[in-house]
Image (tube, helix red, strand yellow):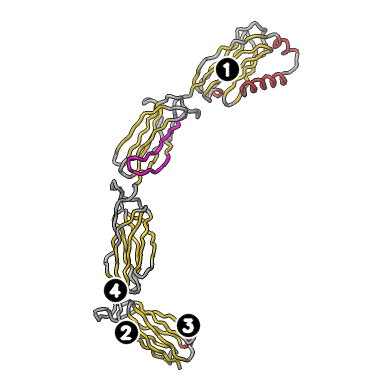
């Protein structure tokens, strides 16, 4: 119906726009009946050919218009009769879109029609593989779709039945190849994963071996699946509760059931539960199939229960015990006023470990001075040869007695400071 409306509209347009002169009116009005059209039934896109209307018993100069209807719209070719026929030239510019051309000739009351099928040309490069999805699990069961849409030199889809060769080179040098035929402008193939993770290269060739069109390669990632059982480690399993050491907690190499290593950047969650009721969640990411995170030592004796989780798969639990230390028991704390420098010198030591030895150099000692209102001032120092020292300016204090306490790991000390 749309095509009929278009043809009628063109006829009306031609009638309205025709010049009203004596030179053209009589020859046109003299024609009626059928206008025979001679045209090729088929042609290739880009071909040149001629269309003839006739033979006709009409005077030379009689106007005959030829309308070519294509899927891209109509085009009018004006012409006149010479020696009983009219000739129309279709150049390569007129024949670049494949499909059917409907020819309609009109002159006065005479009409004629014919059809030409323009066949698409051979596939030209590049033939680009379209892949989706781009990542699949390497378990032999998941698959992706590869589609090729080859075109000829004028951008027309190639003819149905054109041969396409799709190749997929899987990890492990396994080559998969399939011959398919273009149907409704495209050819396609399911590509199933193997069981070895890695990059699969995909290519498409369109046409026969002598005139095949090629294109760029496409990528398909075959990725590891869910991990199998794995473990974590955090040596040693007994440490002093110094609140300072960083313990590396790491997983074993994470692999799926086909021995593929989990990709770098995969999120692994470490969970830490304390015997005192605390719970921590520490995220980490894999590098080389291993996830690792530093865990800070406890600052008091306790036991930590640790495990890791990846995609709902949990590792066995491990435990780390924190023993009293590095300083144990009580240690002396003193405060001396330095009148010359208007400061208080706070000292702690000797600080001893569980074997009666000096604590390691660099052990942090925290001092806390409490004023009459209950406000705290905190100072810190590090040990050297079992002793630590810090300094506080007198200008920040008023006269009175101040409780002074110090902590280092499990060790503790206390005294009183009098400010005159």
Q: Give neighbour class at mark 1: few <14, some 14-19, many 20+ (Cα, 10 Å).
A: few
- Lateral position of residue 276 relative to residue 11, left or right: left
Residue 89: numbered disc: 1
Q: Residue shown at 57%/25% (left/top)?
A: 71
Q: Which residues are magenta?
A: 132-151
Q: Give neighbour class at mark 3: few <14, some 14-19, many 20+ (Cα, 10 Å).
A: few
How far is disc 1 from disc 2 in space, using C-alphas?
111 Å
Earlier residue among tags 4 and 3: 4
Residue 331: numbered disc: 2
Compared with 91, 28 (above or below) is above
Earlier residue among tags 3 and 1: 1
Looking at the rendering, which quadrant does residue 203 occupy? top left
At mark 1, the secondary structure is: strand
Q: Nearer the viewer, mark 2 or mark 4?
A: 4
Q: Position of residue 232 (x, y in %)?
A: 29, 59
- Lateral position of residue 85 relative to residue 174, left or right: right
Earlier residue among tags 2 and 3: 2
How far is disc 2 from disc 3 in space, using C-alphas?
24 Å
Residue closest to the eye, 346 or 214: 346
Disc 2 to disc 3: CB gap under 8 Å: no
Compared with 92, 239 (above or below) is below
Disc 3 to disc 1: CB gap under 8 Å: no
Report which residue position mark 4 lands on.
323
Looking at the rendering, which quadrant does residue 182 occupy? top left
């Amino acid at each position: 119906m749309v095509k009929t409306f278009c043809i009628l509209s063109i006829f009306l347009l031609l009638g309205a726009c025709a010049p009203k002169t004596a030179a053209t009116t009589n020859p046109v009005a003299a024609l009626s009946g059928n206008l025979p059209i001679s045209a090729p039934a088929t042609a290739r896109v880009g071909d040149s050919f001629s269309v003839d209307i006739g033979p006709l018993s009409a005077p030379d100069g009689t106007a005959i218009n030829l309308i070519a209807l294509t899927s891209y719209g109509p085009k009018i070719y004006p012409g006149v009769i010479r020696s009983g026929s009219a000739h129309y030239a279709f150049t390569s510019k007129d024949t670049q879109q494949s499909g059917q051309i409907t020819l309609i000739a009109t002159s006065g009351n005479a009409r004629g029609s014919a059809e030409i099928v323009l066949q698409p040309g051979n596939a030209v490069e590049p033939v680009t593989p379209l892949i989706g999805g781009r990542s699949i699990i390497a378990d032999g069961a998941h698959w992706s779709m590869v589609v090729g849409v080859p075109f000829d030199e004028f951008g027309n889809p190639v003819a149905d039945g054109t041969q396409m060769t799709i190749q997929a080179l899987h990890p492990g040098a396994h080559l998969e190849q399939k011959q398919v035929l273009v149907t409704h402008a495209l050819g396609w193939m399911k590509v199933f994963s193997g069981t070895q993770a890695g990059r699969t290269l995909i290519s498409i060739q369109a046409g026969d071996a002598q005139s095949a069109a090629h294109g760029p390669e496409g990528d398909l990632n075959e990725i590891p699946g869910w991990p199998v059982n794995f473990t974590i480690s955090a040596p040693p399993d007994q440490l002093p509760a110094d609140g300072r050491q960083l313990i590396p907690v790491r997983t074993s190499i994470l692999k799926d059931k086909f021995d593929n290593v989990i990709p770098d950047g995969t999120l692994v969650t470490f969970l830490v539960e304390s015997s005192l009721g605390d719970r921590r969640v520490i995220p980490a990411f894999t590098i080389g199939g291993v996830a690792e995170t530093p865990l800070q030592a406890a600052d008091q004796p306790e036991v930590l229960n640790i495990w890791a989780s990846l995609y709902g798969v949990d590792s066995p639990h491990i435990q780390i015990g924190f023993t009293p230390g590095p300083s144990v028991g009580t240690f002396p704390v003193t405060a001396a006023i330095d009148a010359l420098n208007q400061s208080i010198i706070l000292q702690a030591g000797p600080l001893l470990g569980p074997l009666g030895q000096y604590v390691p150099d660099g052990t942090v000692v925290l001092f806390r001075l409490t004023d009459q209102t209950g406000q705290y001032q905190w100072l810190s120092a590090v040990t050297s040869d079992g002793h630590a020292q810090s300094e506080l300016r007198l200008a920040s204090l008023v006269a009175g007695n101040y409780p002074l306490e110090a902590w280092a790991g499990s060790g503790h000390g206390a005294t009183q400071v009098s400010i005159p």
